[in-house]
Each structure stands twice: as C-alpha cells, then as structure tokens.
Image (cartoon, coloured by chain):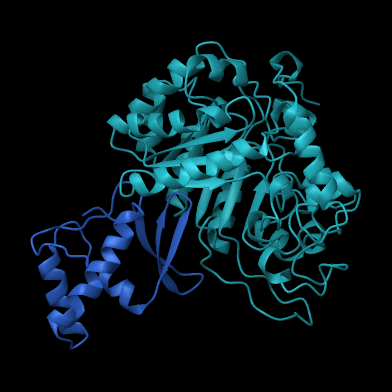
Amino acid sequence: MNEAVFPQPAGEPVAQPTPAPPLGLLAELTHRCPLRCTYCSNPLQLDGRSSELDTETWKRVFSEAADLGVIHIHLSGGEPTARKDIVELTRHASEVGLYTNLITSGVGVSDDKLDALLEAGCDHIQLSLQGADAQITELVGGYRGGFEKKEAFARSVVERGFPLTLNAVIHRMNIHQVPQMIQKAVDFGAKRLEIAHTQYYGWALKNRAQLMPAREDVDRTITKVEEARERLKGTLVIDAVFPDYYAKYPKLCNGGWGARTLSVTPAGRALPCHAAETIKHLEFWSVQDHSIADIWSSSPAFEAYRGTSWMKEPCRSCERRHIDFGGCRCQALALTGDAANTDPACIKSDMHQRLGEIATTESSAVVDPGAAVYRGFRAG
Amino acid sequence: MTEIADTTIPKLPHGVKFREDKVRGNFILVGPERIFNADGVATEILKRVDGKSDFGTIVRSLAEVFAADEATIRPDVASFLVDLSDKQMVTL
C-alpha cells in the first residue's frame, strides 16, 4: 500500500492489543507461471499444483478477509489465470466487496478470458513488464514473443475501458530502459506505472550479482522518474520503489509486520509478508486449519515481529522505530543471520557499510545474461 | 488557483469505488493500491460525485447542507476534486 491511511497507534503497547484489521490480502493462487524471470521473488521451493487450495477454500478465505476489513485483494502467483477457476474466484471476491486486482504476466490471457474476468467484477489489472522492447523482455523473462503478447493484452484491457497498471521490476539488465518504459506506459494507455526495483529475496537473491544496478544509474533513474511524474500529471501516476542497498534508512516493509497486509501461499500458509517463510523458526498457520481473523490476531508468525516489543538495540530506543519498524525482517535474517537485528539498509546497522560495498562490487561487473539463472517450475 | 467550470460533471473513473467501510465506520475512496479515508466533508462531496451532477449543482447542494456561502466553499471543493483528479481518483 502506498498511502498511509490508518495510522498505527503511537506509544509502546503494554499488553498485546487486538491489532487493527488488515487492508490488503495477497492471494498467491498458484506458483505455476509461463515466465522464468531471473528476478522472481517467490521462494526457492515452490508449491506444486497438487498442493494448491481448492476453489471453496479460497472463496471462504476471501469472505473471511472481507469480513475482517480487507479492502484490496491481489490475485497473484505465479500466473493466477493458470487456475481454471480464476473467473469464479474473481466473481466471489467482487461479490463479497473486495477491490479485486489481477496481477498477471498477460502472456496467456485470451480476449475471451479477459472479458469473462472483467464481467465477473475484476476492478483493476496489473500487468508485469520486463523491458521496453522484445529483446530485453525475452532476456529477462525467458519467454519468446512475450513483449508482443503483453502489448496486445495491455491494449485489450484499455480498449475495454478498464484501468491498467504496468509493474516494471527494475535491475541492471533493464535500468537503462526506464524512460522508454514510461513512454510505453503512456502509449499503451496505462493509468499507473510502478517502477519497482528488485527486492532481493528468494530467486532474486540468488541472482543478485546479475541484477544489482550501479548507484549512478539508480540516481539517474530517480531524476528521470521525478521529471516524468511532473510532466505526466493527470495522465500517468508513477509509483517508484528504489533499491534499499543504497539507502540511508530501511523501507517500511509492508506497512509494518502484521500491520496492514497478509499473504496466503498456493498451499494455504498465511504469511505476514511474501518472503516470510525464509525465517525458518516462525510457525505459520494454514487457512485450512484457521480462519483469517484467528490468524491475524493470534498466529505466532504474525505476533513474532508485530509492533516494537521484539526489538533489540539500536532499534529499541531509535526515534524512527514507529516509522520503519527496523525495516525488513527477512532482509535482516538473510544478511545478518538474525531476523530481529536492524535491517542492514539502516545506517545504524553494523552491516550498513558492508551492504553498500556488496552493491557497489556486484553492480560494477559487466552484465552477463548467461550467468543469470532462469526460474524453472520445479515444485516440491 | 484551481477552478472547475460549473457545467463540468465530475465522475469516478472505472476502477475507483466510493463505499462505506463498515468495519472501520467510515467512507473510503478505493483505487488501485490507493485508499483515501474520507472525513465528514469529503464524504459529503464524494456522495455527490454521482456521474450526473455538475460541479455547480454539487457546490449549491453542499452550501445548503453546511449552511455556508457558495463563493466561500467553491475553491475548497474545487481544489479537493482537482487534487483527486491529479491522482486519477476522479475524472473532471
């Protein structure tokens, strides 16, 4: 979520209060996907088709989420339209009052399927963009003909009068194309563009040395995005996330742990964030055993890093602890070995300088697409 | 200075919804990755953005409800709607 609308209560909670209800649910309907992106942020171990939740369970999850106060549902994956029941699920989400966002690669979605999804109440479509032309798109996504299919899909959405967001994940192989991507978004008739620098979890962490952009390129991109934002006011909204390896302070990850959003994996595990399963000691509850309301209020994984009482120094006494909650727990674990440490993106972390050095070293190597490992669907 | 002609009909674009949030007890304007909490005044304005009423009608109606002078509230209502229009949450 980009707009802070429900401020977190200030001050140190004494007892564990009932948490404010979540705003967003990321429903990862399947891990199956036609693309093989090198930056994929899904876990190394994917959920197989046979372990996917059935239609009725997802419908129950959507109803429970709406009752609890969820506003936005993001139907995602993998490629959510790979599910045969995607239209039925979309209809149910819409019927229970959720704002329904379909996050898709757009490469396998026919016009008939699109019509059915829109008729079923899909409110908004988010299309992934790997590059501004065929060459880069294929290089990054490992899917031949992907760009042409994406362009045709984008135009189909816009022709039908529906709002389209393009989501471009940025890294060293495509950072030079940001201005062209902005132009493509305008040409396609998209209303929004997300310039989202790669977050280094899961598959993307594996490929970090091939993905990390140079600081000068990031700085140049920030300037270009700011210029375009002003120039295209009223035509295109541009939201941008920049890589935190070069930041001074960490990001407010997901609006705070267990504060605003939750994810449900294809097999039904409920996570405080998309990457949370990398924190092995956490106990995740499944939607097959618990309601969304119970999970939100009482699941050990959600309680583990909610609020500030779990913090160590320097977070515990930090004046920014209610601003960014010490950054990202998954990144803290991946880089320092302890999820309760300060995210190294923070200047107060012992590892902060090292993080900048990693980024500088890795980004200075020549891009070698052959060294990037394409995602394959090898589920457990 | 932001101005809107009296004959302009503000609309909610496709993909933007104005609805009651019963769990939190208020009204919200919802778009892609966006939620605006509407306070009392914003709620009264947005309830009148029905795709039929023009700006002049909306201002007159609000002036009546709040027992305010039309000329006084007109710039405030205009800047509220122009701001939402810049964010693609309202079409003018």
| Residue at horizontal 38 percent and vertical 20 percent from the top | A152
| Total marks in image | 0
Front one among A198 and A349 = A349
Left or right of residue A318: residue A217:
left
Residue depicted at x 53% and y 57%: A66
Residue A46 visible in rendering: no
Q: Is residue B25 left or right of residue A293?
A: left
Give the residue displayed 54% in from the left and 28% down from the top: A176
Which residue sits furthest bottom? Answer: B67
Rendered residue at 91%/48% (across/down): A337
Q: Which chain is cyan?
A: A
x, y percent for residue A2: 53, 55
Res A125 quadrant in image:
top left
Question: Quarter of the image holding residue A321?
Answer: bottom right
Residue A307: x, y in percent? 74, 69
Q: Which one is in front, A292 or A19?
A: A19
Q: Which is more toward the observer, A347 or A192?
A: A347
Q: Is residue A143 visible?
A: yes
Q: Colour of chain B?
A: blue
